[in-house]
Amino acid sequence: MNIQFNPYAFVERLSNMGIGMLVIFVVIGLIILTTMLINWLFSDK
């Protein structure tokens, strides 16, 4: 097994990590909005 340290690989993958973080924030936002909508629809007024 040959393990090599390649610092440039981290820089190459920053765009993929950024897209992953964006997707996570979008999903969390959708969960929050869905929860707010459900609370608004089914709350006693």
Image (cartoon, grey):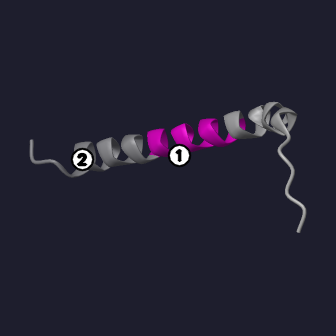
Q: Is residue 24 magenta?
A: yes
Dot 1 lies on which element?
Answer: helix
- The image quadrant where one finds the N terminus is bottom right
The kind of residue tagged 1 is Val
Q: Please identify the dominant SS of the magenta region.
A: helix
Q: Callout 1 environment at 10 Å: few (<14), some (14 to 19), or many (20+)?
A: few
* Residue at left offset 24%, top offset 47%: 39
Image x and y of residue 10, in percent: 78, 36
**Quadrant in the picture for residue 8:** top right
Q: Position of residue 41 (x, y in %)?
A: 26, 47
Which residue is identified by label 1? 27
> Alpha-carbon neighbours of circle 2 within 10 Å: few (<14), some, or many (≥20)?
few
Q: What stretch is highlighted in magenta?
A: 19-30
* Extreme residue in the bottom direction: 1
Q: Which mark is residue 37?
A: none
Number of numbered labels in the structure image? 2
- Using the image as rendered, state which of residue 16 and residue 22 is in the foreground: 16
Q: Name the residue under label 2.
A: 39
Q: Distance between the residues labelled 1 and 2?
A: 18 Å
Q: Is 9 contained in the magenta span?
A: no
Q: Residue at x 42, y 48 (%)?
A: 31
Is 42 in front, or is 6?
6
Please indicate whether residue 41 sits to the left or right of residue 22 in the image.
left
Q: Which amino acid does label 2 sit on?
A: Asn
